[in-house]
Amino acid sequence: MQVSTKWLKDYIEINCSADELAEKFTMAGIPVENVIHAGEGLEKVVTGKIEELTPHPDSDHLQICQMNIGEKDLLQIVTGASNVQQGQIVPVALVGAHLPNGQKISKGKLRGVVSMGMLCSSDELKIEVAPEDYVKGIYILPEDTKIGVPVAEVLGMDDDILEFELTANRGDCFSVFGLIREAAVLLGENPNFPEIKVREDDEKNSADLIEIKIDAPDLCSRFSARVLTDVKLFPSPKWMQERLEGAGIRAINNVVDVTNFVMVELGQPMHAYDYDEVTGKVLNARRAVEGEQLHTLDDSNRLAKGGELVIADAEKAAGLAGVMGGFETEITEKTKTVVLEAASFNSASIRRTSRAVGLHSEASGRFERGVNSNATVTALDRAAQLLQDMGACKVCKGIVDVYPVQKNEVKVQFTAKQINDRLGTSLPEEKILDILKNLGFKISEIDVEVEPERVFDKISFAAKHLAKSAKELSENNTVDDFVKNIGSTVGELINRSHSDSFTTYEAVVPDWRNDVTIMEDLSEEVARIYGFDKIPVTLPKGTQQGRQSKIQNFIDKIKFVLSNLGMNEEVSFAFTHPDTFDKLQIPADSELRKAVPIMNPLTDEFPLLRTTLIGSILENATRNFSRKNEDVRLFEVAPVFFPKNLPVTELPDEVQKLCGLIMGRKDPKGWTQNNSEVDFYDAKGIVEELFEKISVERYTVEAGEHFAMHPGKTAVFKKGREILATVGEIHPKVAENFGINKKIFVFEADIETLMKSTSKKFTFENLPKYPAISRDLAILVDKNISAGEVEKVIAKSAGKFFKDVTLFDVYTGERISADKKSLAFAIKFQSNERTLKDEDADDAFKNILSQIEKNFGAELRS
Amino acid sequence: MENKIEELRKSASDAIKNITQDLKELDNLRVKFLGKKGELTNLLRGMSQLSAEDRPKIGKIVNEARAEIEKLLAEKNSELKAKELQKKLDSEKIDVTLPGRKIFQGRLHPLTLTLNRVKEIFIQMGYSVEEGPEVETDYFNFEALNLPKDHPARDMQDSFYITEEILLRTQTSPVQARTMQKNSNNAPIRMIAPGRVYRRDDYDASHSPMFTQVEGLVIDKNITFADLKGTLDFFCKKIFGDSAQIRLRPSFFPFTEPSTEVDVSCVMCKGEDEHCKVCHGSGWLEILGAGMVHPKVLEMSGYDSSKVSGFAFGMGIERIAMLSYGIDDLRYFFDNDTRFLNQF
């Protein structure tokens, strides 16, 4: 919705600037998005007549104009335009003008000829609703245009335009009248609405000429029509064109312009039918049949889906109601008789149809927000009046009006206390009533059966005041005076408790407001007019314990630990694509491929919800890699989505996952670093550190499998049968699929499983009182024996003084045979009761040795 | 004898003075003069031939000479040691302007950092943090919030649908309805619901199909619009600093009545720069929507709107992060470029 202040000023006095008015509207809940100021950039553009036109001596396409701009001397301007002729009146930008398109005009020479300005096109002047010929060529003004006057005045651009971005609930403000009603309250002025009066100067009765039917009363609550005869088509008067242009609507002809004018003025969309083209002289609001042909006025043939509301004559649908008229019944040069329609259509139905057709018109926008079905007749009268006043028609007697179920008056009960309680204000009752009355609510006091709670309110109110008054009186009065005065105090209190905020009122909601139905709506009306800025600032009373859930704390902890381990947190979209599954080598039958599909994805790129975070993290690594960010250390905690069934019929499972990735250098590039790259054990170390910090203990690690990982470099962390985490090197094929020719290491874990596996309670352990004894064990074993297994056997066979074992060296190479590896462990023994003797450790050591010999064929390395 | 001692003292003193570098030489001198077979010791041996009268006298002189030589030796010794240390220190000099050894620093995502600040403020004010599913039913996402099907306000939130009845939540408000329905007997609520939400918006500098929201809900007896205003004023001052002002503009949301858009005074220019790039000269920045909970929303989730009232608000974490850090393109958040992430 946009409107010029000129149109508003037709009906109300406005003594403030457009910006101030916009601010007032905005702060009262009628948001003005933008103010286009009068003739902005047109200050130095005037009308000028081309007195002489001569070709430029040195150019084929330039012409030299001698311009009469109402001054003594002619002004010489060189133009490149081809659509100018001598005698025409055109807009002239003078030296110093700064046009709306940003162009600055200065004195210049074009191929040696002095030019003192520029002739302008509509494009350069930013006139949006100009005739098409003038967009690129010079805007040729009418012959009778005054010379030497500001072009803004001539073009009706001497006015500010308010562009509203109205909220969905205020359909009433999609009209000049609606805005005037608001402005009247905000400015404290009385509006001057035009008198709507029509002379029915044709003997014929509308009702005899046209039959109106409503076959779909649920979609059309009212259908009113009037017939106009002897219709003459011509351009509508300049004042009307200007107002329509200000509202962003292009003038077409008087009949169409009037229907548009009334729509903007009253908010009631209208449609004009060529009566002679209406077959059977009947218009019926009915549902379209599936597959029905709809020939709309844009001359396209549409097929009805079925169920859309159409206005049909005896043979065919003559338009999609409220969205687009029909082709055959459109007003043309030949039109002699017109049927004017003003109807009230169901907003949901209009919304569906206009979305389906992809057409949002001024009319459909108004119907979607709801129009006042009581206003159809006024609209018909206003349109007839305007056409009649310009001598464009005769008006038949009467109105054909089908209005099966009259709209009910909406009544809302309230007390001032309820409103003040909701707002946290203490507005006097009169103030509240005044605001509502000014907005058109009819207020009356009503007798209601008072609820017990309210009686209590009244009594406690009275008691409090009585006690206070009695105290004051007793302090300053003799007993006689006290008795005399207390009587009048009680009387006063009884009066006040009646008149004060406990009185119940009934507000009759004005019929143009379909958004007010309950007391809470009234409280908003009071608040927005009183001013949100004047509402006090308080905090809710009482206290509660603020907290986060355990899992939220757990996730926060994981993020904290990982960021302290040099990992950056990433946030990526929850969407994915089957191609990503292929790139990750996810097996065809894997559950991970059964992703939740999105019905209406934004682009073909993202049709699914992700089932793994590895795809996103690899994509992020790829992006960084391609940007030469070589050291990438990322992690993410986010849900993945698994459908309970496909196709989806219920909410999918959302499972919180952790995923991390490292690639590039072990340490940041620097003069002290050897620039070695991260390896598997860096990734595994991060997981181990994390587990220690979040108290995941007593897990085992073994070689494992993962579709996207190197088969020989994948480890699973387990507790019992439960997999806590998988860590590994990305399979070189997968890395290649993502376009990375470097080693990438990734880990993955399930948040809930991790949380279940944390040690319940942390307990402090006393520091040892007695020293420990350490023994180093260096052995040779077969290459394929895993160190983890050896460690397990050591732990098991080390006896009661065993404390811990640390692998401190692994060697393969020329000094030992090719199928062997050397492992060196430091084994620690300690007792809480005494200082151990060498024999204690020696005994244990012997046992360990024999066990690993037995289990692994290990030999002691000399 | 006395002369001999004097001679010895002098020659020792000269010899010690002449040493400039070598600690070993100094030690040799010590041996030479004071050692078991040293010259002074030799002199002392000759003492036995002295008379009993002279002995104490000469003894005293010898001891004095000894003390003096020892003192000279000690002085020289510390002088040489200091010199030697100085030499060592000089030789150990490094270029302290070379950069220190780096370790990788990890960072929390700026959205997490911002969300943590928001959570902290509200937890301190007694709010609990609630969560709900990202894939929601149409009922919880829209209908329970007074947004029936075909409501024009649904246009404001273009949704990703999974089925006709299941969608990616467009707001975290469904968590409010879920929390209310878990409660009974009009139990008071103070909660925030942070989380990712999804709207079918093209991806550009100010729109993203996925973003982060925090919704808040307070329900209790006698909760007023003034309480809402006070709460948001407090929050904005905590987030943007004590000088931050808020401005409430009436608006429309189907789930609140009255409804308001909330602006905060421009964090960049404080409303003083007509050409400010952040607020475009208006002095205000829109940061959240709020209002008093619509009675229908209360009733639909089992609360009695005649007994309790409440307020609700919703804000975008990206918006607050952009204003806090001066980020001008939303896409940075989801691009995950390490050069961006490393800045926080």
Image (cartoon, rainbow, N blue to C red):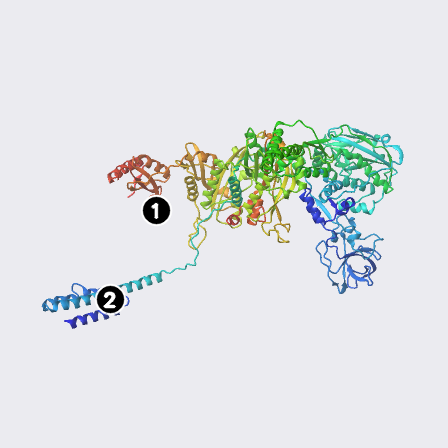
Q: Quadrant of the N terminus of chain B?
A: bottom left
Q: What's the amino acid at mark 2?
A: Leu
Asked if A86 appears above or below B203 in the picture, the reply is: below
**Observer able to see residue B163:** no
**Observer able to see residue B119:** yes
Which residue lies under the disc numbered 2?
B72
- Residue A787, located in which quarter of the rendered image? top left
Report the residue at 62% width, 51% height from top: B271
Asked if A242 appears above or below A358 in the picture, the reply is: below
- Expressed as whole percent of the image width and height from the top left, the position of residue A656 reads 50, 36
- Expressed as whole percent of the image width and height from the top left, the position of residue A710 reads 46, 40
Distance between the alpha carbons at the discs numbered 1 and 2: 62 Å
Looking at the image, which is closer to me, A316 or B143?
Answer: B143
Report the residue at 45% width, 45% height from top: A564
Looking at the image, which is closer to me, B339 or B263?
Answer: B263
Which is more foreground, mark 1 or mark 2? 2
Q: What numbered label is drawn on residue B157?
A: none
Which residue lies under the disc numbered 1?
A814
Query: Which SS class for mark 1?
Result: loop
Q: Which residue of the protein is positioned furthest toward the bottom in this rendering?
A: B3
Looking at the image, which is closer to me, A15 or A245?
Answer: A15
